[in-house]
Amino acid sequence: MLSINLLPEEKKKIFGMEKWRRLIVFFTVAIAVILIFGEVLLLPSFLPMFFEQRELNRFTVLEQEIRRKLKVDENLKTNLTLKKEIDLLQKLVSSPAWATPLLEDVLALPNFSDKNLGGQAQKSGVELLQISVTRDGRVTINGLVKNRRNLLDFEEYLRSLGRFSDVYSPLSSLVRGATDFSIQARLKQ
């Protein structure tokens, strides 16, 4: 059916304006809902991050100022240098010094090689287990021998080195023919 609007021109404009008003209200409400929904979702996570970032920047400035005042970087470099030196000293102290002249002379025993030191029998019949030197010059050599003759030969060899003033082993080692021995000596001054 065909309809004809018989209203005057002024009244016809009112209908057109009402359509535009409804369209504007619809988009205004839609934008308001989107903004409110966005604020509900974004503000709870954004605001704490904003304040945390601000505090983090403040703490960073404070930390840099404290580091500068307390000279932390210089102290850290000094501590690292000291740590390297202590590590080096610990490494030197914890490993035995094999190249001392006394050890070189003792290890120069005929048919004795230093690669066999520490548990394997030598051709000379002497197996060294420990060599101790005290600050006052006393030397103790512990080890194993195959027989009494090897012990006497080793004792004579130590005397012939000329580095010791007294070389003796307990009489019990010689009498009972023990396989383990302990020789005491004193370094010459």
Image (cartoon, rainbow, N blue to C red):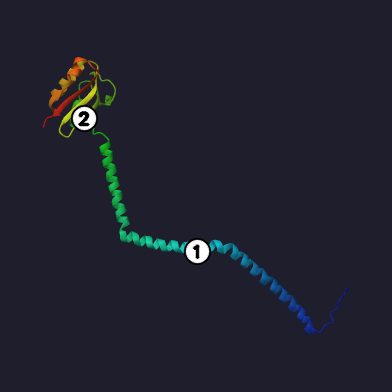
- The amino acid type, in three-letter code, at marker 2 is Ser
Estimate how packed mark 2 is, as few (under 14), some (14 to 19) or many (20 or more) residues with alpha carbons within 10 Å: few
> Residue 131, image x and y in percent?
22, 28
Is residue 86 left or right of 12 when viewed as pictured? Answer: left
Q: Where residue 154 is drawn, which disc sits there?
A: none
Quadrant (top left, top right, bottom left, bottom right) of the C terminus: top left
Estimate how packed mark 1 is, as few (under 14), some (14 to 19) or many (20 or more) residues with alpha carbons within 10 Å: few
Q: Which residue is mark 2?
A: 132
**Disc 2, disc 1: CB below 8 Å?**
no
Q: Which residue is mark 1?
A: 50
Give the tally of numbered discs: 2
Is residue 169 left or right of 92 when viewed as pictured? Answer: left
Q: Which residue is at the far right?
A: 1
Quadrant (top left, top right, bottom left, bottom right) of the N terminus: bottom right
**In the rendered structure, which disc, 2 or 1, sits on the residue that comes first in sequence?**
1
Question: Element under label 2?
Answer: strand
> Residue 89, image x and y in percent?
26, 41
Is residue 120 left or right of 58 when viewed as pictured? Answer: left
Residue at 21% over, 30% down? 132
The vertical placement of 80 against 134, above or below, is below
Is residue 35 left or right of 73 when viewed as pictured? Answer: right
Residue at 64% over, 69% down? 32
Of residue 138 and residue 176, the one placed in the foreground of this image is 176
Residue at 28% over, 52% down? 78
> Residue 171, image x and y in percent?
17, 18
Q: Quadrant of residue 91?
A: top left
Question: Element under label 1?
Answer: helix
